């Protein structure tokens, strides 16, 4: 299926920019080709470059799990991966189950569309969670309010969503409408990469189909695995009709919050600003004297519900982060080893 993606993309259409270019040595610039990872399978990586589609070959010391959809890698003429370029943004999650390793979901996403619908799905706490996640990943977030055609509260919901973060853009729309691609065009220009998150049924698939001009039937490929079971293989990074790319992986649909302390701070910025004026540095904002937060709530300048949600998110984050701290350290150590091995090989070859 992937072979059918046309091989006519320039590097800049694929999303290559000065951020990545500046990471290349002169030697690498002359001898290696940048390629973008569009699919990560259990034991293979597929990528697109200026010369088209290729299945990449990996050093025995690395595995496909060390890479994420959207990554930029440098490859030699045999499509062997020589080096992974530092991503601009990185969306990760904790592995399911007791093993708390960090899994890469997608790298180098420019804009995350947080999708919610104008009905019972609308939930400020959930939106704040996704906003914290996007901040932590280094991705710009835009909120899409779907099913605007079915609601008479659209303006009210848009206002509430916009209040969640400074300068937050909220786009109400009907995902089934033909003008959807036009509405989203500002974030889907040439070389731009987007991803969609949100609960089940809010319209992600509908939006994706409009953007890519594909129907759901062509998105997942049913294959028989070695044991004869049916598995669905995803084309994880797909071109958007008007330019740009959309990343959709099964992991993207099951994102959870972890290790998001900086992201949470960014989303609840207004509370943190006020809290800096509390009399005591360790103020819990309950009933301490001189608490600026309680004062602001009493004056109607701060939302008491938002304070509650901030506390809850912080508690959750603390709980999750402590258990992943160790595994993250291990991941970092491992990727250093990977790059050292690759570099060692290069210097032995006299590059
Ligand atoms: N009227 C209207 N219907 C919509 C809108 N967005 C989605 N729908 C409908 O809602 C249903 C669910 O939409 P999907 O696109 O499958 O939702 P999803 O987010 O992909 O759901 P999952 O695949 O479960 O994650 C479909 O029947 C859509 O046609 C909208 O803006 N307006
Ligand atoms: Zn206080």
Image (cartoon, rainbow, N blue to C red):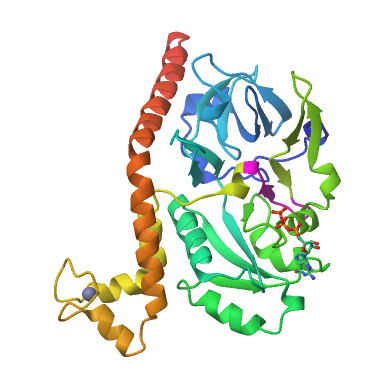
Q: Quadrant of the N terminus?
A: top right
Q: Main secondary structure of the magenta part?
A: loop
Vertical arrangement, residue 7 with respect to residue 108, above or below: above
In the image, residue 33 sits, relative to residue 127, either above or below, namely above
Magenta span of residues: 240-250
Q: Is residue 343 visible?
A: yes
Q: From the viewer's perspective, tell me whether residue 308 is left or right of residue 291.
A: right
Q: Residue at x 38, y 53 (%)?
A: 317
In the rendered structure, the answer to whether residue 263 lies left or right of residue 37 reads left
Residue in the picture at 46% in, 18% down: 342
Query: Horizontal and vertical percent for residue 178?
Result: 83, 67
Q: Nearer the viewer, residue 24 or 54?
A: 54
Q: Nearer the viewer, residue 43 or 45?
A: 43
Look at 79% across and 53% down and name the residue there.
241
Q: Name the outermost residue toward the front.
A: 98
Q: Quadrant of residue 100?
A: top left
The residue closer to the viewer here, 8 or 235, is: 235
For residue 6, say whether it is visible: no
Taking 129 as reference, is 251 above or below it?
A: above
Q: Position of residue 294 (x, y in %)?
A: 27, 81
**For this view, does 299 lie left or right of residue 342?**
left
Q: Which quadrant of the frame does ligand 2 lie within?
A: bottom left
Residue 116 at x, y percent in the picture: 63, 66
Q: Position of residue 18 (x, y in %)?
A: 52, 45
Residue 140 lies left or right of residue 223; in this view the side is left
Label total for image = 0
Task: Please tell me whether residue 328 belongs to the stretch shown in magenta.
Answer: no
Q: Quadrant of residue 234?
A: top right
């Amino acid at each position: 299926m992937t072979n059918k993606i046309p091989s006519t993309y320039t590097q800049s259409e694929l999303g290559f920019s000065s951020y990545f270019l500046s990471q290349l040595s002169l030697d690498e610039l002359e001898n290696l080709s940048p390629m973008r990872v569009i699919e990560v399978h259990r034991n293979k990586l597929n990528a697109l470059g200026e010369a088209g589609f290729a299945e990449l070959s990996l050093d025995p010391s690395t595995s496909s799990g060390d890479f994420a959809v959207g990554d930029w890698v440098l490859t030699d003429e045999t499509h062997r991966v020589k080096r992974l370029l530092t991503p601009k943004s990185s969306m990760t999650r904790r592995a399911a189950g007791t093993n708390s390793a960090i899994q890469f979901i997608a790298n180098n996403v420019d804009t995350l569309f947080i999708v919610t619908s104008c009905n019972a799905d609308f939930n400020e706490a959930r939106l704040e969670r996704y906003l914290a996640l996007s901040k932590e990943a280094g991705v710009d977030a835009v909120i899409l309010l779907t099913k605007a055609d079915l609601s008479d509260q659209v303006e009210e919901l848009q206002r509430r969503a916009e209040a969640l973060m400074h300068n937050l853009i909220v786009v109400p729309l009907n995902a089934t409408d033909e003008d959807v691609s036009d509405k989203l065009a500002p974030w889907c220009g040439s070389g731009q990469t987007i991803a969609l998150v949100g609960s089940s049924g809010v319209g992600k698939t509908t939006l994706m189909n409009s953007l890519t001009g594909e129907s759901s039937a062509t998105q997942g490929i049913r294959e028989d695995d070695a044991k004869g079971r049916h598995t669905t293989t995803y084309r994880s990074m797909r071109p958007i009709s008007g330019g740009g790319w959309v990343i959709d992986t099964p992991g993207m649909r099951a994102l959870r919050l972890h290790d998001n302390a900086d992201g949470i701070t960014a989303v609840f910025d207004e509370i943190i600003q006020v809290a800096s004026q509390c009399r005591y540095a360790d103020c819990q904002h309950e009933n301490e004297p001189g608490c600026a937060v309680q004062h602001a709530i009493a004056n109607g300048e701060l939302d008491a519900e938002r304070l509650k949600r901030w506390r809850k998110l912080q508690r959750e984050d603390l709980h999750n982060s402590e258990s992943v701290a160790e595994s993250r350290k291990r991941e970092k150590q491992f990727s250093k080893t990977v790059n050292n091995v690759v570099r060692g090989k290069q210097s032995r070859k006299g590059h």
